[in-house]
Image (spheres, rainbow, N blue to C red):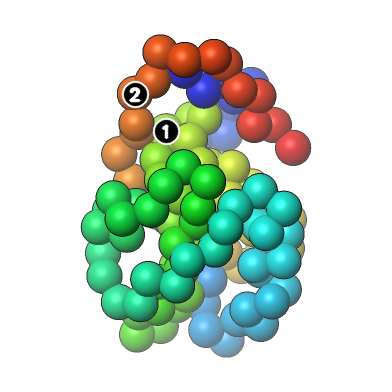
């Protein structure tokens, strides 16, 4: 089980509008925690299904770069990614579109 003490809502993928995309600005802080994988064009859940827990997927659609972690939910990678990217720019948008992954393992504190 992954535990988060943050009371903010859980989010799925993180959308960064193209008018704000300086890719390195957003990916640099994520590189400390995740291997970044360029997925190309697909739905966020499909991308999440193609990556491992130590990876974050980058998807490009018609008007935004989308960053996806392996799982959603309050303590999921997507919430953690969203918090990191929100510190980079307040213009990022969170979409709850990634299903949580259930685990009975050790608690990991993802608070940053």
Q: Is residue 23 above or below residue 68?
A: below
Q: Is residue 5 above or below residue 58?
A: above
What residue appears at the point 34 percent right and 31 percent down from the top-left corner? 101
User: What count of labels does the image hold?
Assistant: 2
Position of residue 50 measured from the top left corner of the image (x, y, whole percent): 31, 55
What residue appears at the point 54 percent right and 63 percent down from the top-left corner? 36
- On the rendered image, what quadrant is the C terminus found in? top right
Q: Residues within 10 Å of mark 2 (few under 14, many from 20)?
A: few
Quarter residue 110 falls in: top right
What residue appears at the point 25 percent right and 57 percent down from the top-left corner? 46
Q: Residue 16 or 108: which is nearer the viewer?
A: 108
Position of residue 81 measured from the top left corner of the image (x, y, whole percent): 58, 50
Q: Residue 87 or 51: which is nearer the viewer?
A: 51
Judge from the rendering whether residue 100 lies leftward or rightward of residue 38; answer left or right: left
Residue 73 tag number:
1
Residue 15 tag number:
none
Position of residue 88 measured from the top left corner of the image (x, y, whole percent): 73, 63
In the structure shown, which secondary structural element does the residue marked by tag 2 occupy? loop
Judge from the rendering whether residue 53 lies leftward or rightward of residue 21; answer left or right: left
What residue appears at the point 69 percent right and 76 percent down from the top-left corner? 24
Judge from the rendering whether residue 107 lies leftward or rightward of residue 96; answer left or right: right
Q: Residues within 10 Å of mark 1 (few under 14, many from 20)?
A: many
Q: Does residue 112 show up?
A: yes
Q: Which residue carries the number 2 mark?
A: 102
């Amino acid at each position: 089980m992954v535990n988060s003490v943050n009371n903010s809502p859980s989010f799925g993928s993180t959308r960064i509008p193209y008018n704000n995309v300086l890719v390195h600005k957003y990916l640099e802080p994520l590189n400390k925690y995740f291997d970044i994988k360029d997925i190309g064009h697909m739905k966020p859940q499909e991308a999440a299904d193609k990556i491992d827990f130590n990876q974050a997927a980058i998807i490009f659609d018609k008007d935004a770069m989308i960053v996806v972690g392996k799982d959603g939910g309050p303590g999921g990678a997507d919430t953690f990614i969203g918090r990191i990217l929100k510190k980079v720019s307040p213009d990022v948008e969170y979409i709850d579109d990634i299903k949580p992954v259930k685990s009975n393992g050790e608690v990991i504190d993802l608070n940053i």
